[in-house]
Image: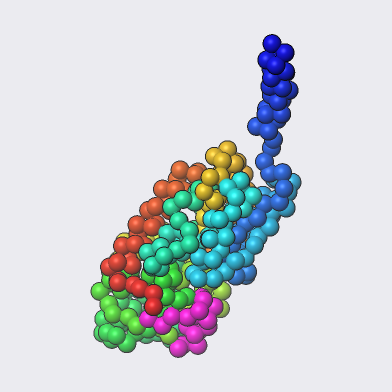
């Protein structure tokens, strides 16, 4: 009987501790957001803007940790192998989450096992042409490319990048043959566009916008279902006659496998609230990105839809990484 009483007493004493453990607020320490690309790019900038607001909301430091390499795979692996407690997150563009597993023979992580949190923003791709290209509209560019098969060049951020795949999507739908000139990033690609060394670039509108405003390049059309708020005079995909030319850069927040649903939902709710703030919206639009902030289920469906879209492009264009 004494032994039973001692066990009962021990159980009663443990109950408050268990209840306390279940109600401890998250976060209790700094949160790390892994960005799988170098500092200074759109991915890095947008995540830092959001991170500042989350730090204020959580009263904890939010640290952006740049881990570039292998098309984003290095950073994705770092986040994937972290503890699933919400203290390490991944803020990523499409590559690591919806494209790379269709290009690389093996990956050190399983893209499908990340816990989707939210899509921060969308930034449509745009057909950017050198200023002196003898075509002022997308329709004129298609005619020019058809008249010069295999002579018109397009720059990309590199093999397998969204700019590469968007150009291949365009070529298939427009029925033209273009020559691929891969670069190491969007910066060098845009510099050669402004210098007239390549003809077009199907890249992120946020990166090209300042060159377009300076008159160093021209926009022929955006690869989206509607016009971009940062360049409202540029026609959309339907207006240029290619309604299925839908391609954008987007930036999503995900968590490692096993992250508690309660933590995922808290990060989602706090992120959505931050993305609605007028100053955050203004800063995002300055970067050419439209804030989103959707729920976790919608985010999961969106990533799957994007994965299917890019998989089809990769297969139809027979894109491979050498």
Residue 157 picture location, percent across and down: 47, 75
In the displayed structure image, the side of residue 141 where residue 11 appears, left or right: right
In the displayed structure image, the side of residue 74 where residue 180 appears, left or right: left
Residue displayed at 38% across by 67% down: 105
Q: State the quadrant of the N terminus.
A: top right
Q: State the quadrant of the C terminus.
A: bottom left
How many tags in the picture?
A: 0
Q: How is the image coloured?
A: rainbow
Residue displayed at 33% across by 67% down: 314
Q: Is residue 61 above or below residue 23?
A: below
Q: Is residue 279 above or below residue 69?
A: above
Residue displayed at 44% across by 70% down: 161
Q: Quadrant of residue 33?
A: bottom right
Residue 154 picture location, percent across and down: 39, 80
Residue 90 picture location, percent across and down: 56, 56
In the displayed structure image, the side of residue 237 where residue 206 appears, left or right: right
Residue range highlighted in magenta: 180-197
Whether residue 133 is visible here, answered yes or no, is yes
Viewer-closest of 116 and 241: 116
Residue displayed at 74% across by 46% down: 59
Q: Is residue 160 above or below residue 15?
A: below
Residue 158 picture location, percent across and down: 45, 76
Farthest residue to the top: give it. 1
Q: Is residue 185 above or below residue 76?
A: below
Whether residue 243 is visible here, answered yes or no, is no
Q: Is residue 188 magenta?
A: yes
Q: Is residue 72 magenta?
A: no
């Amino acid at each position: 009987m004494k032994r039973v009483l001692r066990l009962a007493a021990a159980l009663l004493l443990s109950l408050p501790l268990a209840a306390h453990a279940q109600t401890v607020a998250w976060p209790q320490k700094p949160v790390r957001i892994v960005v799988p690309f170098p500092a200074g790019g759109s991915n890095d900038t947008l995540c830092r803007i959001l991170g500042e607001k989350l730090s204020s909301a959580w009263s904890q430091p939010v640290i952006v940790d740049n881990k570039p390499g292998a098309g984003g795979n290095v950073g994705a692996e770092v986040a994937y192998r972290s503890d699933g407690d919400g203290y390490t997150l991944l803020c990523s563009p499409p590559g690591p989450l919806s494209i790379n597993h269709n290009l690389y023979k093996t990956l050190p992580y399983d893209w499908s096992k990340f816990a989707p949190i939210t899509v921060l923003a969308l930034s449509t791709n745009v057909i950017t042409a050198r200023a002196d290209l003898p075509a002022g509209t997308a329709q004129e560019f298609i005619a020019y490319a058809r008249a010069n098969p295999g002579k018109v060049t397009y720059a990309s951020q590199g093999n397998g990048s969204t700019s590469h795949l968007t150009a291949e999507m365009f070529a298939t739908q427009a029925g033209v043959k273009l020559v691929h000139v891969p670069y190491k990033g969007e910066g060098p690609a845009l510099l050669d566009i402004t210098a007239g060394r390549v003809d077009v670039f199907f890249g992120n509108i946020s990166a090209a916008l300042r060159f377009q405003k300076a008159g160093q390049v021209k926009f022929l059309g955006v690869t989206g279902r509607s016009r971009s708020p940062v360049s409202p005079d540029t026609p959309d995909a339907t207006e240029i006659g290619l309604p299925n030319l839908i391609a954008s850069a987007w930036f999503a927040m995900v968590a490692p496998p096993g992250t508690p649903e309660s933590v995922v939902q808290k990060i989602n709710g706090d992120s959505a609230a931050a993305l609605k703030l007028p100053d955050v919206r203004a800063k995002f639009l300055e970067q050419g990105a439209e804030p989103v902030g959707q729920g976790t289920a919608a985010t999961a469906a969106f990533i799957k839809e994007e994965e299917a879209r890019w998989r089809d492009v990769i297969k139809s264009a027979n894109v491979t990484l050498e």
